[in-house]
């Protein structure tokens, strides 16, 4: 007797964000007798990610359509979009990334720490400890198994694989649960700061306030342009560092990963696109080396240091950079050599 095939797993599979499967699955939790059954926490999480992603993408064309139809867009709303983009973007770069995750500088006052981390929370990329924990794992496993958002791990080299890798690194990884390593990092980061714990625990309220506050200045247009559309643009710019800056750009340093310096993404992300520099010197406060590499966050940090607002800014000297270049070159040569040695063995085993 033929055995019945195992039932298909109830969870969405694959790496693409399965927005529509999620929504269908929540709808399906209304049982045949019409009674509502609470979806499991994993489904709730993935559905909220779907709504969070699709909502702004629908809002933008609708808002543009209304603006064209009325031949009017509130200049205050446009100013709030630009200002909000910079505030939330710098909150991520100066706050979540360079202060909380890499400790590239110290603030002289806990109030300042709270301000920059709150600006990061408003961006809508998750509570601070989760962001920093995930990013710490990205640095320890860059483009290797265990990297939460590498466009290279488990993807083929053909165009389909490249596209799937890009989508996974941009947004698809958000659907995956954090690894045990990331969970440990999150716990450690939470334990280290009362400000982080408070922002973690009040994250949705802070995020909601950031979306609604522009409405006080410019009504519904403020909420749409300064809140929802701003969130869409900031988040995709940041996530492009995970995807594009591990795929396209220049490599100044021969790091053991696929990180790249991408000028266009650096312009969009207040300097974070100098991502190969960052992987070579993760603790370095300035990601741009020299004036040619745009890094608005570095200008802000220099300004804050000159006014005594921050201290202990990590800045490698030219000699340290030259030494690092040599060390990375030597380890790249060693990697190449060991690959050359293992190739004939692999060919013999085939
Ligand atoms: Zn990276
Ligand atoms: Zn980093």
Image (spheres, rainbow, N blue to C red):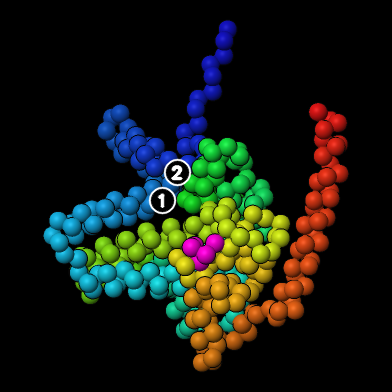
Name the disc covering residue 59, or none: none
Give how far across and how far down residue 138 sits, in percent. Answer: 61, 58
Residue lying farthest front? 292
Q: Is residue 292 above or below residue 131?
A: below
Residue lying farthest left? 70
Q: What's the CA distance linking mark 2 and mark 1?
A: 9 Å
Disc 1 secondary structure class: helix
User: Quadrant of the rendered structure where residue 203 is?
Assistant: bottom left
Name the disc covering residue 49, or none: 1
Q: Residues within 10 Å of mark 1 (few under 14, many from 20)?
A: some
Q: Is residue 132 above or below residue 3?
A: below
Residue at the (78%, 67%) spot, across then down: 326
Q: Is residue 263 magenta-colored?
A: yes
Give how far across and how far down residue 209 sits, in percent. Answer: 32, 69
* Front tag of 2 and 1: 2
The quadrant in which the N terminus is found is top right
Which residue carries the number 2 mark?
Answer: 17
Q: Residues within 10 Å of mark 2 (few under 14, many from 20)?
A: many
The residue lying toward the viewer, choosing from 13 and 190, is 13
Q: Is residue 73 left or right of residue 210?
A: left
Q: Is mark 1 within 8 Å of ligand 1?
A: no
Q: Which residues are magenta?
A: 262-266
Residue at the (80%, 53%) spot, across then down: 335
Residue at the (47%, 50%) spot, across then down: 171
Query: Can I make out residue 331 in this image?
Result: yes
Q: Say whether disc 2 or disc 1 marks the residue closer to the N-terminus.
A: 2
């Amino acid at each position: 007797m033929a055995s019945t095939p195992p039932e298909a797993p109830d969870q969405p599979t694959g790496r693409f964000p399965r927005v529509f499967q999620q929504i269908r699955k929540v709808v399906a939790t209304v049982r045949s007798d019409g009674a509502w059954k609470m979806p499991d926490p994993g489904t709730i999480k993935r559905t909220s990610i779907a709504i969070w992603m699709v909502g702004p993408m629908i809002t933008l064309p609708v808002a543009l359509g209304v603006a064209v139809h009325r031949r009017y867009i509130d200049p205050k709303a446009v100013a709030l979009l630009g200002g909000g983009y910079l505030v939330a973007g710098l909150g991520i770069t100066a706050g979540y990334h360079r202060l909380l995750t890499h400790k590239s500088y110290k603030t002289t006052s806990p109030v300042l720490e709270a301000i920059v981390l709150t600006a990061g929370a408003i961006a809508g990329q998750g509570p601070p400890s989760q962001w920093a924990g995930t990013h710490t794992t990205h640095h320890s496993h860059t483009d290797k198994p265990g990297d939460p958002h590498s466009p290279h791990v488990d993807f083929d080299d053909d165009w389909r694989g490249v596209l799937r890798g890009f989508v996974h690194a941009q947004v698809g990884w958000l659907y995956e649960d954090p690894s045990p390593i990331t969970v440990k990092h999150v716990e450690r980061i939470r334990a280290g700061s009362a400000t982080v714990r408070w922002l973690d625990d009040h994250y949705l309220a802070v995020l909601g306030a950031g979306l609604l506050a522009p409405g006080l200045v410019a009504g519904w247009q403020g909420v749409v342009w300064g809140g929802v559309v701003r969130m869409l643009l900031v988040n995709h710019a940041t996530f492009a560092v995970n995807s594009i800056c591990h795929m396209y750009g220049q490599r100044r340093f021969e790091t053991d990963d696929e990180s790249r310096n991408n000028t266009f993404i650096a312009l969009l992300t207040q300097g974070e696109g100098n991502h190969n520099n960052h992987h070579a010197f993760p603790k370095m406060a300035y990601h741009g080396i020299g004036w040619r590499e745009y890094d608005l966050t570095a200008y802000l940090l220099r300004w804050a240091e000159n006014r005594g607002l921050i201290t202990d800014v990590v800045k490698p000297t030219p000699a340290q950079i030259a030494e690092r270049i040599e060390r990375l070159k030597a380890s790249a040569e060693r990697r190449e050599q060991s690959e050359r040695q293992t190739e004939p063995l692999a060919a013999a085993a085939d």
